[in-house]
Amino acid sequence: MNQTKYIFVTGGVSSSLGKGIIAASLAKLLQARGYRTAIQKFDPYINVDPGTLNPYEHGECYVTDDGAETDLDLGHYERFLNVPTSQANNVTTGRVYLSVIEKERRGEFLGKTVQVVPHITNEIKERMQQLGKTGDYDIVITEIGGTVGDIESLPYIESVRQLVWELGENNGIVIHLTLVPYLAAAGELKTKPTQHSVKTLMESGIKADILVCRTEHELSSDLRQKLALFCNVKKEAVIQSIDASTIYDVPNLMLEEGLDRVALKKLDLAEKNNPDLKQWNEFLFKLKNPKHTVNIGLVGKYVELQDSYKSILEAFIHAGAVNETKVNVISIHSEYLDEQTAAKKLSGLDGILVAPGFGGRGIEGKIETVRFARENKIPFFGICLGMQMAVIEFARNVLGWKDANSTEMNESTPYPVINIMEEQKNITDMGGTMRLGAWKCHLTEDTLAYSIYNKADILERHRHRYEFNGKYLNEMQEAGLVTSGVNPDTGLVEVIELKDHPFFIGVQYHPEYKSTVANPHPLFVSFVKAAVKKKSE
């Protein structure tokens, strides 16, 4: 097959309908049929990337191997497809404009007036085809963020219109995801919002090839016929996307609806092989038929918004299925934890995870949590800031350095056991300047970390500015802190653990970013296993 085919996914009526999940599910089905498939996300906000956004604004910031700070939808793409994404898979309006302005400053437009059309749209089209031009993919799915009709989405919609026309027949199609709301008072589903949304799309010069309808109730045959007629699509291209108990059900639901078959037909591609979802469905079976249940406390400072810790929650789902265990994640706000409340809120848990984060808010609560888990022998897992809090707790309560802290929280601490990284000291720009992406780590034999990974050399993704202060390494080791993972090039301590504890481990990196359905992350798998053991005792 010589030419890469393109599928564009747009949204209408409302945001948060799950374009990312639909795109990932379709990609999963096409991949399971033997097509090499990639997904990318184009976001209409003007931030260059989500790296500087508050988690309350946009959910978690996902990090790729090559150090791109991206939208959390890329996490779904990786979890579904088990294929790493990169800088090229997430583009924002900010990045597009920045690139065009830099070209203008260099004089690349030869004195022309720089305009949205053609200069911005050309930049968007170029980036939309970047993955396709590598020759690595048969099909590239592009998710357009936002909703049709939004002012900020207009350049993307225009770029899609141009590109579908330029690619020629059967080489580019548009899937429009929309809402079919249920009016309880009338007792019926309403198609009018979808009709208006499709009309708005058509006013921009784009005809939807496939309609995916988010709904809480089954779409009747008559309703599908009506949508097909008024939205100018074939009846078989009206796809129902009904609420599911888990996002991992969606590929099977889309398979039943024939979304992949309709898409292949529109792209003039063969329906080669039935989708091989054997491994996927084994995972689903274990997920839905657990033999055990554990309660794990997620102690963080952004717990009000579930999406802030999206990858951690999904990693627990993957690890739970491996252990045939239902993991109840209990969100606990670290800001409201102190010596008095910790025992009340944390006892009765089978495991405790102290989550990543930035800034001083809720820090003392996290340190108190670590102390409680350490002293009460509750399986403990600290990620990034959670690992740093474990180091501070150890310094304060085992070594007796009462004022030990991180220079992020207290610049004048007498014991800066966590310190800003040397190369971070003179940085003024906050965006994209942390230690990012995949870095090497060497694990020491005969440690918990080594037994979990079952190998000495690993690559894990980072996102931090502060690190373990090597100045205190010897004293900490003598007092019983095991530094089981170290970066071979920088000497940075990556993993800490305690020996006389059923399960106590802290990691400077973010293992949750690499957990997928096909490859659940070993740290999460072992942590859930330890929680199951704790409960049975």
Image (cartoon, rainbow, N blue to C red):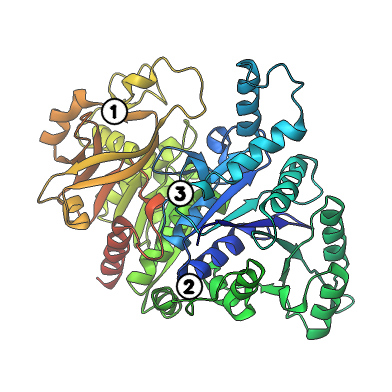
Kindly identify which numbered label has been placed on residue 250. Answer: none
Asked if residue 501 lies left or right of residue 273, the reply is left
The CA distance from mark 1 to mark 3 is: 43 Å
**Along the polypeptide, which appears first: circle 2 or circle 1?**
2
Depth check, mark 3 against mark 2: the one in front is: 2
Q: Reply above or below: 108 against 378.
A: above
Residue at x 48%, y 56% (from the top left corner): 137
Q: Which residue is mark 2?
A: 33
CB under 8 Å between discs 1 and 3: no
Q: Residues within 10 Å of mark 3 (few under 14, many from 20)?
A: many
Q: Reply above or below: 341 against 268.
A: above
The CA distance from mark 3 to mark 2 is: 20 Å
Q: Which residue is mark 3?
A: 85
Residue 142 at least partly seen? yes
Q: Quadrant of the C terminus?
A: bottom left
The CA distance from mark 2 to mark 1 is: 60 Å
Mark 3 residue type: Thr
Q: Quadrant of residue 390?
A: top left
Residue at x 36%, y 79% (from the top left corner): 291
Mark 1 residue type: Lys
State the image coordinates of residue 370 (x, y, percent, origin top left): 33, 45
Q: Which residue is mark 1?
A: 402
Mark 2 residue type: Arg
Q: Quadrant of residue 91?
A: top right
State the image coordinates of residue 306 (x, y, percent, origin top left): 56, 53
State the image coordinates of residue 26 (x, y, percent, origin top left): 57, 66
Q: Reply above or below: 426 against 263.
A: above
State the image coordinates of residue 32 (x, y, percent, origin top left): 46, 71
Depth check, mark 1 against mark 3: the one in front is: 3
